[in-house]
Image (cartoon, grey):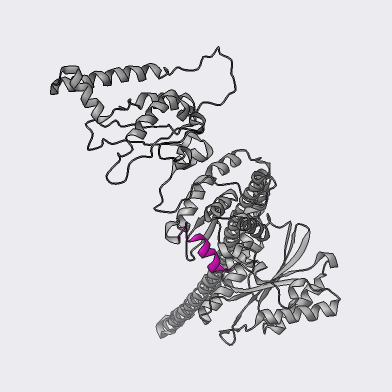
Amino acid sequence: MIPKASQRAGGQDLATHLLNAFDNEYVEVAEVRGAVASDLHGAFAEWEAIAHNLTRCRNYLYSLSVNPDLGQGQLSRAQYLDYADRVEKALGLAGQPRALVFHIKDGREHCHIVWSRIDARAGKAIHQPFDHDKLMMVTRVFARDHGLALPEGYARGGDDRKKKSLYEMLQQKSSGITKEERMAAVTAAWNRSDSPRAFVRALEELGYILATGSRPYVLVDLYGNMNALPKLIDDRSVRTKDIRAFLEAEFPPESLPSVDEAKALVAQHRQAREDFARSQRDGKALDRLKAAQAARRQKVEAAQASLRARHRDERAALAREQLSARQALKARYLAEVRRVKAARAAARPTGLAAFLGRVTGVSFVIAKIHKHRDAQRHAAYQVEKAALAERQADDKRALAHRQALQAVDIAREVRALAQIEARELKSYEVAQRREERVRQRAGHDHMPALTLALKPKGRSAVPHKAKDRYRKRDHQRDDDRHDRHPDRGVQDQEIVITVDRQEKEKGSALREAFAGSVRPAVKEDQRGGREEGERGDGGGGGGGDEGRRRRRRRQAREVAAEVPVPRGPDPAAPATGLPEVHWTELPLADKFRDAARDSDGGGDDGGSGGRRIRRSRSARGPERGEDGKDFERER
């Protein structure tokens, strides 16, 4: 068996967790000891009130879960109770209030035991030193006495990195990916990556973002969970300093997004997936859950309504009883008064006796005595009436207090039921999300890939390298400029090659942009141009300028005649399936290449001039330049 124990607070949340009927197929509250309330929420509330009023203890509960090995058979209730008695004796909790709850989850029966750590008589909390070691000893003795085999976790030593924490268990519950699967995927990405950029790209393919938090390198997955990168690399030879040295070259910690920023990024990436999956859900499971909750709530609400009706009947019965008691007291008093009056009337003297009584004053004395006795009788009646009213008021207050306590109990049950329903709906949502994420992975042991471009700060993109390497013309943008040389009198011809990045303009858009933005470069020798100008106008300065302008116009017409007119594809023409010609193989590129080579001395003063365009290998062949350098290699 495997016991798991902890000192904790939050009794109401624990009671809600223990009574969750969605995660558990069967829930049974077997025992509640040391509390007035018979339910878990009420008992834990009592223990919390005692802890806060008598002590300053925060973790006033000691919670233990006992999970037996189904391969060795189920434990009987007597064995569970025996184990609980042994544990509370070893931990000094004997006689303390406790609660026992039995669960059946996925066909596995297990038990939860919760003790109150507060000793009400001593007014202090019971200290729990070395409780885990004591649990291990109790478990070993119990297994020996009952002939049970201990799991591998009881062996000495072991790899602490493979032990799951509560946070890792919650990650596995929400994502459906175990800690071992995470470690295997990240370790494989680490082993097959030869550069930091390749490693980060491999992490993105596994659904992770490299971020920084309290530690330099943290992985945030698609589901918003975060883990330290060194803990997910299952290789004892790899140290944290090795990982930092490997990544700091291209991904320093200050250039990475924070954990909150990474969570915001993956939340946007995940929202569309979850919204679509939520719209495709089958609502039958939710309907069944709500139907079961409605049936359970109906019983509690019926009990609450019955209690209210019973309270009304009790109050009405008490009012009738008290009214009848007051009426009986008053009737007895009036009956006594009438009897006394009748007796006095029967004993009243007549004739000579009445005359003598009035003459002698005896009748006056008798009248005074009767009046005094009537006053005494009335005073006794008032005292008895006040005592009756006081007793009836006490009975009414006692009834109201008892009914208030009963109403509080049933109201607490209703509130507890609402908490349980909310927890069950949350468990349903978590289960549905986990199943959807498992389906989205389609059998893989990692999350879907993230298409996020993570680049170190301060490093600009170099798209022409990717173009030259992979021939992806949809991702290129080249700016080639040729500035005017200060010694030459030729106006600078600026050439800008612009390639649209959009996928729909891959093909003919390149030729159109190139042909529309290129202006013919002027290839002329300074001395030859001056001589031709002098010949055009007979040596005059103005005539030389006019000759140069005529030559420029003629060269522009020749180049324009060679540039093909961009036209859209003919829908009637059959598809040839041949790849498009690269822009360096166009006729215009050759002329521009010659002009660029002649003006090789130009460029921006600040060193920001564009890359000069060389002849492509297919167009150049084995030829080399005057300096003997290979143009393709130089490019």
Image x and y of residue 170, in percent: 61, 60
**x 43%, y 19%: residue:** 566
Quarter of the rendering containing residue 226: bottom right
Q: Residue furthest toward the bottom?
A: 122
**Which quadrant of the rendered structure holds the N terminus?**
bottom right
* Front position in the image: 219 or 246: 246
The one nearer the camera, 540 or 584, is 540
* Displayed quadrant of residue 116: bottom right
List x then y, in percent, for residue 448: 60, 46
Residue 117 sits above or below residue 250 on the image = below
Q: Residue at x 35, y 30 (%)?
A: 595
358 sits left or right of 580 in the view: left
Q: Which residue lies furthest to the top in this view?
A: 572
- Residue 347 appears anywhere in the view: no
- Assign the C terminus to one quadrant of the image: top left
Residue for point 78% across, 79% down: 140
Q: In this view, does 393 lie above or below 476?
A: below
314 versus 435 height, above or below: below
Which residue does the image show at 58% across and 76% down from the upper left? 60
Image coordinates of residue 514 in percent, x first then y, are: 40, 27
431 w.r.t. 110: above or below: above
Using the image as rendered, state which of residue 64 and residue 28 is in the foreground: 64
What's drawn in magenta, residue-wise? 239-252
Q: Does the stretch in magenta take in 248?
A: yes
Q: Measured from the top left, where is residue 164 in percent x and y? A: 65, 66
In the rendered image, residue 151 lying in the magenta stretch gets the answer no
Q: Can residue 156 be seen in this view?
A: yes
Give left or right: position of 304 versus 621: right
